[in-house]
Image (cartoon, grey):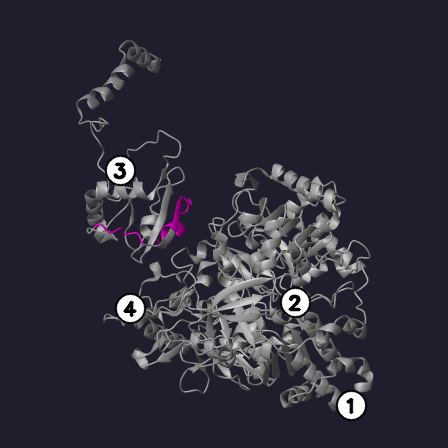
Amino acid sequence: MLNWLKQFLKSIAFWELLKGMRVTGRHFFVKKITIQYPEEETPKSPRFKGLHALRKYPNGEERCIACKLCEAVCPAVCITIDSDESSDGTRRTTRYDIDLFKCIYCGFCEEACPVDAIVLTSQDKYCFENQGENIMTKEKLLAIGDQFEQEIAKDREADRSYR
Amino acid sequence: MVNFEINDKQYSAPDGTLIIQVADREHIAIPRFCYHPKLSIVASCRMCLVEVAKSPKPLPACATPVAEGMKIWTHSPCACDAQKSVMEFLLINHPLDCPICDQGGECELQDQALEYGKDVSRFTEGKRSVKDLDIGPLIKTDMTRCIHCTRCVRFGTEIAGMRELGATGRGEHMEIGTFLEQTVDSEVSGNVIDLCPVGALTSKPFHHKGRAWELQQVASIAPHDCVGSHVYVHTLRGEVMRVVPRQEDSINEVWISDRDRFSYSGLKSPDRLLKPLIKKNNEWVETDWDLALQFTIKSLQAILEKEGGRSVGALVSPSATLEECYLAQKWLRGMGISSIDHRLHRMDFSCDSGGPSPCPTFGLALTELENADTILLIGSHPRTEQPLINHRLAKAARKGAQIIMVNPIQYDFNFKVAAELTPSGGQLLHPLLGIMNALLSQKNERPHFAWLTPFLKNTVSTPEEKQVAEWLGRGNKKVAIFLGLQAQAHWHASALQLVAEALALFCQASLGYLTEGANSVGAWVSGVLPDQGPGGISLSEGKGLNAHSMVKTPLPAYVLFGGVEPEFDLANTVAARRALSESAFVVAFSPFRGGMCEQYAKVMLPIAAYTETEGTFINGEGRWQSFNAANPPPGEARPGWEVLRALTALCGGPGSLYSRSEEVRDELKHIVQNVPSVTLPSLEQRFRRIEPILSESKEGLRVVTEWPIYRVDSLVRRSKPLQDTAASPLFRARLNPKTASLYSIKGENKMRIRREGEFECILPVAVDKKIPENTVHIASALEGGGNMGQQGAVQVFLESNKDA
């Protein structure tokens, strides 16, 4: 009898609604965590694994020595390398392709690299419009490396003490 | 037998066995660098130190024989500590450049450092560096990486027979080098690449091309000589990256020749034929297989109808696979073409004419060869022709065998030769008759060989020949006689063959043939002969022309199968060029275009080269060795047997369609097992056929030609690293100083060589004491050597210098 009365009073007073509105009302005044993408972005760890790049030394010489360790370690088998002797007698790649459709962004290639040539940058905004664009060639990777070198270097520096 | 313990387990081994040998037998891991089962023991690297009870210090397992009651521990704290310390010493001066080192991934130092070394380096001082050497186009050096195991040095002394690499200096100043700045020219030099446990000696053509772990390995058989060496072909994404030896102790042990190792470079030649081509109005037009095959058949049929069965000559490469040989003869005979031959170097067939020829095998197994007591080689330079037979001969010589050479010129041998007979004018027959004569006199057996007497009428044995006869006729000794490539290509090849047969009969020796190509025996077995069918069975009808007669008088049409380049491969290149360019129709089945072929051929059909086709080679011992394709043929090229299968089907021949090459092989095997073995006419009968040769005069100059080591087939000729080696000769006429002065020719002169009505050729002269008198020695199959005709008597004139 009492329970019934309680239920009845609650229902005519919209108690459940008020309870729900209380949560809404509280969040109305709390500080928001929603990010207004693309105007805003979440902060990224220096270890973020995004688009790949091939780095160069400050004097412009490519770092990659075609040791093929990244190709060997890649669990998705997305890296294809052809190597040969370059005109100055050093070991260089003649082809360095990464198939981004196959890549699982595990970062093992970066771990395996003895000269920090292949890196995963923090770039995460890229798309492919045509067939075949998913294959990152050596030229494309070196261009990405050139473009983001400062950022790449900063990220490595930040993470250095943990390596 | 002695009993001993390794790691607390009982083992026994024959007295004198080394600890490391027992450990290898029992699969107990002992690290090592300088020890190699095929080389002598030096115990210099100390990596194999093991603990032995009652020994104050650890002992090297590679130099310590097991003894009764010995207790050995390979992984005790003492042994491990010793191994760790040795590894630390080795790494003091070894650069840490594994990522750019070609040996990375297959490096013994890398593997053993991981397993037996310490994980941290205590060495902070500067490392030693050593200047690299340029030792030729085959081997790349990086001497800083050398750990001084001296395997390469011992290989040179013990296997290659040339001390080309040596160690100078001591301790940290020890360096491996060539003493003087020179190249390493041994014909088996490439094996030091496999021997080197680190990346100090690596393959130059493979330099920086790939990694050991990414290569696919396919077992194959080497295609350049009749030894049939076992090899592995390593491919990367369908491209052959390198060829390495595959261990087979009864054939090639662990070695292969440089020719087998580096010829693969020719597969990537820009000359590769990628599509069927038909010549229209003197222009090559690409076409499809159907059209090309139909055009080929129609053209051949038109000529056959007009001119008859003998109007088409078919030259099949002696390195074509068994399946190709069998299907080729089946297709050709089905079309009515009877002139089929694979004996391209040969020019004298008189002893085999009409009758069956003997199967060109070694006559004994290679392992028996090294145990022979007396070996007679006639017209053979095994060092360049079959480098691994040369290795067996060297082993035999080391065991005390008397090796006798009868050659047109003097060669450098890397083993002790008991006697070297080099008759003047390349007349190999005379010393052989001299030996035969001496043998008959010695044994007083003339009555049994009465029929030989007329041939020995004018023969007087020299003391040297008598000595050789004594060695051959000792009785109770194992004697092996071989007819080499130069005896088979000789203008008296038949007579040489018969005299050798007589010698073998007389001395109860084995008679063997060191043949051209990888599959001469296979070609014989499959019936690629003008008068013999599959299994060597004599044809009663439909006998054709042999390789030499086919080009001597030009025929209206030719079929060239398996990359035959008549302008290089045939005995008489001048006649071959004339015959082919005059003929109405030539079809070339070849992996390659380029060269003369484009001028004379009407159709070029691309077939697979050796790593690209499955097949079988029969080596000189008579072993059927099948192999698989390692990589797909480029472009529209197809394996030769598939092309021939299609042709047979198009001709509506009796041939059933084979779905796999094994079916072809098995069909042939069935035939071979069911035909009676070949019986040759008696020696006496066959000797009658060569009678006229023996009355020929001894006088006059004669040209002797020889196929250089890296000019033997179309693939080798396109391998750039091999062509860049010092073994590639120049087009020179080499003369004895005495002969040269007789014709007032000096080293800087040019010489005109002429045979009436056949050819005329002008070429520079080189004076060489190794050439006997009355001999003009010229390397054949060279670029620009096209005007040089066949071997034999010639006239020589001094070319005035102003014309030169």
* Pointer 4 residue: B121
Q: Closer to the observer: label 2 or label 4?
A: 2
Residue B681 vs residue B255: left or right? right
- Same chain for the residues at labels 3 and 4, yes or no? no
Of the 4 image quadrants, the one containing the N terminus of chain B is bottom right
Disc 4 is placed on an element classified as loop
The kind of residue tagged 2 is Gly
Amino acid at the residue labelled 1: Asn
Dot 2: what SS? loop
Which numbered disc covers residue A123?
Answer: 3
Disc 3: host chain: A
Residue nearest the observer in this picture, B701 or B90? B701
Q: Which secondary structure is most common in the magenta stretch?
A: loop
Marker disc for residue B620:
2
Based on the displayed image, in which of its 4 quarters is residue A6 positioned?
Answer: top left
User: Which of marks 4 and 2 precedes in the sequence?
Assistant: 4
Q: Is residue B20 visible?
A: no
User: Which numbered disc covers residue A70?
Assistant: none
| Callout 3 touching callout 1 (CB < 8 Å) | no
| Residue nearest the observer in this picture, B305 or B528 | B305
Q: Residues within 10 Å of mark 2 (few under 14, many from 20)?
A: many
* Magenta region: A60-82
Residue under disc 2 on the same chain as residue under disc 3: no
Q: Is residue B140 above or below residue B610?
A: below
Badge number at residue B444: 1
